[in-house]
Amino acid sequence: MDTPDLNIQLKTLPSQPGVYQYYDKEGTIIYVGKAKNLKKRVSSYFTKTHDSGKTRVLVKKIVDIKHIVVDTETDALLLENNLIKKYQPRYNVLLKDDKSYPWICIKKERFPRVFSTRRIFKDGSEYFGPYTSMKTVSTLLDLIKGLYALRTCNYHLSENKIDAGKYKVCLEFHLGNCKGGCEGLETEEEYYENIKGIKEILKGNFKDSLSQFKTQMKQFAEEMRFEEAQKIKEKIEVLENYQAKSTIVNPKISNVDVFSIMSDEGYGYINFLQLSYGSIIRSHTLEIKKKLDETDQELLELAIIEIRQRFNSNSREIYVPFKVDLGEDVKVTVPQLGDKKHILDLSLRNAKYYRMERFKQIKITDPDRHVNRIMAQMKVDLRLSEEPRHIECFDNSNIQGTNPVAACVVFKNGKPSKKDYRHFNIKTVEGPDDFASMEEVVYRRYKRLLEEEQPLPQLIIIDGGKGQLSSALKSLDALGLRGKIAIIGIAKRLEELFYPNDPFPLYLDKKSETLKITQQLRNEAHRFGIEHHRNRRSKKALNTELETIPGIGEKTVVELLKHFKSTKRIANSKLDELETVIGVSRAEKVYNYYHNALKDKHSKNNLD
């Protein structure tokens, strides 16, 4: 089969709305898309320079294009959604057709039963849902059974069979849960009044049922039937309590779908709230994996069509955070304030919570995906050209101007790599000079990595502001690494991030994972540096007294400390104990030093 000429296909595309399909050399659909204008949209793939590497790969693989012209953009959206679910093309976002949601069925029969089901039959029965959890279904069914007496048996209650006395009332009748329609003790009309009330409750409308119960209660009270009036009063309280819990917005907001989106580098999270009579009757969050760096608008439009199909929603109005193009059949509202904005914010909060829960789950179940997501997010947040899989952070320590040292900590894939941590004693700088010290340690670190042909980091973080960053840059310049490694400085006070040749700092969201990892690096470098500084000061203080003993060198000091653990124990040791560690000659020098000092101290005390 000859390969189609793409140029000819592009020139002959119509300028109507429709759906296009891209095929690879194997004849497999690799991408499905919609367009207001097929010619313009498809041509843009081959004439534009694409920033996304994934899109560039997709375009290289296209060998054939097919298209379907439709009447409207809405038709294009629906067709695109169906084709994606049918073929699951490699470069499209993933949409899974989930048929396992629970529904509430009102069976088409005399004296209809009301029950939960996961299967739908086209037999004229009415189905409400689907619901996103069985808990919601159970709560609604419990509410309905508490308000209305309904049959639960599977009998075929035809008029002839009831008249013939084929059935007898069961325990449910004696418990007051059923009124005995099987023996003709309740008319079909009376039963159907209950079904009408149930339908309204399932739609979120409590007003009619409340009004009906209040009328019944008043009537029973007037007829002195106080026990029955009390039972109706209890039902009213149950219904009002449920209504109070479920009604969270203006009751005038009815038959509306609310959509919001929260996204990161790899996934989009679209929350859906369905409102009826001011109550949320459904909530669902859809997770969509990005394939070609899709925009939030593209993801939201696709998700709205998918979710409305999945949940069989026919609402004529939707609330969204920004304008989307869904054709003329649906009114699109972008709320700015009031109750409408409140419910949109609630939807966004649900999307955020879902995303955070997924992060926690993925961290345990799929650590590779967790790391990949964080690395991709850091690349964007820190404006890097590649993911910072290997990061090194530097910090100086010179408490009270003494024993200047520096620390370098290393993170790989967002986690500390402690075997790669390094300490530096400042060699070329006199006194406390942070800038010169930073220049020295950065130079020494990367000169060594270059000489040993070790991998360089993708990112260097300098603990400090513009001054320390400039000093580190001098070393990178000297080593010819400027521009080859990204480098930033982080100032402690306001968590400002400084970049080379940029006078304005970057401020990250205080809750962002990127800032948390950056702070963790900085804090770890500070801790590691302080620890080394303390050890060095302690060792120097410990060694000073021993090294002042004439004829005792550093090697002897190390041997003594290694054996006796402290100068106090050395001072109190007997001569023969010292001789076993450092020999007769050096032992006498140490022994005499401490014992002569002790005699001098006693003599001085006696004179005083």
Image: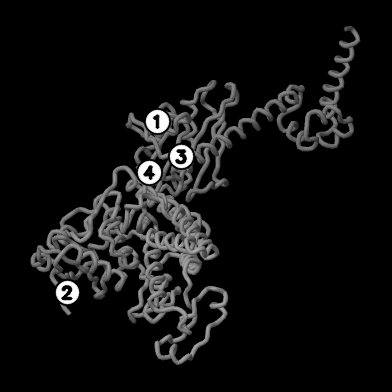
In this view, the mark in front (4 or 3)? 4
Tag shown at residue 381:
4
Which quadrant: the C terminus?
top right
User: Tag 4, which secondary structure?
Assistant: helix
Which of the two residues, 360 or 441, is positioned nearer the viewer here? Answer: 360
Within 10 Å of disc 4 (Cα), the crowding (few <14, some 14-19, many 20+) is some
Q: Residue furthest front?
A: 223
**Do labels 1 and 4 touch, CB within 8 Å?**
no
**Do labels 2 and 3 touch, CB within 8 Å?**
no
Q: Residue at x 16, y 66 (%)?
A: 18
Q: Which residue is mark 3?
A: 446
User: Tag 2, which secondary structure?
Assistant: loop
User: Tag 1, which secondary structure?
Assistant: helix
The residue type indicated by label 4 comes to Asp
Up the image or down, 271 lies above or below 493; here it is: below
In this rendering, would 173 be left or right of 295? right
Q: Which residue is mark 2?
A: 3
The residue type indicated by label 1 comes to Lys
